[in-house]
Amino acid sequence: MPSTTTAAASSPKLAALGFCGADDSVNHRHLILLGKSYPTIEWGILFRPDKEGQPRYATRQWVCRLAELLRQNDVANAPPPIRLAAHLCESHVNNLLSSSTDTSCANNIDTFLNELYNWGFRRVQVNATAVNGEALPENIVFLHDESKGGIKPVNVGKVAQDTIKACQESGGK
């Protein structure tokens, strides 16, 4: 018997569509309006301190204003009204990669990640590339550990292979 499922019903659904590089030239209210009208949009904001205020790199003031506008219509304990992703570059990546061995870096990145969360960011992308001032070493794996405050880089050479396998199977939890 032929299948009654249509091609449209079996087609994959778009979960998110990312737009990256919103900066001070972007009108906050337009960004929010588009984000609310099209909930699949995820707004990527690049964070690289040495380029802050340049095209594609918003200033801290611009991000704070966006967060303020988002909070105006916020309902207690509700997810942010639009999707925001922080794209970490340069010194933020360096701090993250060094956070397991350097207390100062750990404090810096923990403070910054808490700030991002308070501003409404619910996803972080690590842009560990040479063009962003850092190349991700091949032997680094990121593991999520809520009891230790979030994501920490771990040198694979120091972690037993069965531990890595267990983390992969559990989705990093």
Image (cartoon, helix red, strand yellow):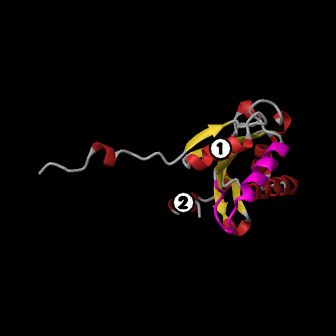
Q: Are marks 1 and 2 in contact (CB under 8 Å)?
A: no
Q: Earlier in the sequence, mark 1 or mark 2?
A: 1
**Residue that appears at 73% across and 43% down:** 28
Q: Is residue 116 magenta?
A: no
Q: Quadrant of residue 92?
A: top right
**Can residue 44 be seen in the rendering of this structure?**
no
Above-or-below relation of 137 to 146: above
Above-or-below relation of 66 to 24: below
Q: Is residue 67 magenta?
A: yes
Quadrant holding the C terminus: bottom right
Secondary structure state at the residue bearing disc 1? strand
Q: Residue furthest left?
A: 1
The answer to whether residue 82 is left or right of residue 54 is left
Above-or-below relation of 148 to 29: below
**Residue that appears at 67% across and 56% down:** 158
**Can residue 34 be seen in the rendering of this structure?**
yes
The one of 137 and 92 positioned closer to us in this rendering: 92
Q: Amino acid at mark 2?
A: Gly
10 Å neighbourhood of mark 1: few (<14), some, or many (≥20)? many
Q: Amino acid at mark 1?
A: Trp
Residue carrying label 2: 171
Magenta segment boundaries in residue numbering: 61-81
Secondary structure state at the residue bearing disc 2? loop
The answer to whether residue 168 is left or right of residue 138 is left
The one of 115 and 133 positioned closer to us in this rendering: 115
Above-or-below relation of 97 to 26: below
Residue 43: give its label: 1
For marks 1 and 2, give the one nearer the viewer: 1
Question: Where does residue 43 sit, x and y in percent of width and height?
Answer: 65, 43
